[in-house]
Amino acid sequence: MEFLESIEQLGAVRLLKTSFLAYPIVNALHIAAIGMLFTSVIILDLAVVGVIRSLPRREFVALFRRIALIAFGVAVLTGLMLFSVKASDYAQMPVFLFKLGLIAVAALNFLVFSALYKRGRTDEPCPGLRLTAVISIILWGGVLLCGRFIGFL
């Protein structure tokens, strides 16, 4: 806990805590990144599952993978900034720890998805790729719910 409390006392973190604008801006960026991430992941996964068929799948998936990765990077960066403000409190919250676990599993699922996608020879996804897409929807939905619960517990 001492390490987490020391994070909360860093100059940049104290500035984030006390600034009238900084925390709301970081929070808004985090929410926007999560929205962009969740939306791109859902659209990507629905295309892989076969719900969205009107666009060329390869280009569509490539575009939304890039968008998801950028949004994930922004969400992680802003999430770390928000975490730093109450690091010792968040680290003790089971829902926060569960959220981190879901993010880790979702990241592993994305690596499996990427490996299967690169190996695919046709425009028609294999059953394993479709399964990773369904798992992705469930995992990211769980991350979203856990994130919302953090603010209310």
Image (tube, rainbow, N blue to C red):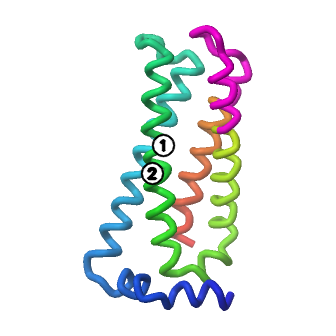
Q: Is residue 76 left or right of residue 18?
A: right
Left/right of residue 59 with respect to residue 105 in the rendered view: left
Viewer-proximal residue among 86 and 80:
80
Q: Nearer the viewer, residue 28 or 68?
A: 68
Kind of element beneath mark 2: helix
Residue to which mark 2 is pinned: 34
Q: Nearer the viewer, residue 117 or 146?
A: 117
Residue 68: percent from left, percent from top: 47, 40
Q: Where is 40 relative to 119, above or below?
A: below
Picture quarter with the C terminus: bottom right
- First to last magenta residue range: 111-132
Position of residue 137 relative to residue 12, above or below, is above
Which residue is label 1 attached to? 38
Q: Which kind of residue does numbered mark 2 sit on?
A: Ile
Residue, far left: 21
| Residue at figure coordinates x 46%, y 71% from the top left | 81
Note whether 13 is above or below 153 in the view shown: below
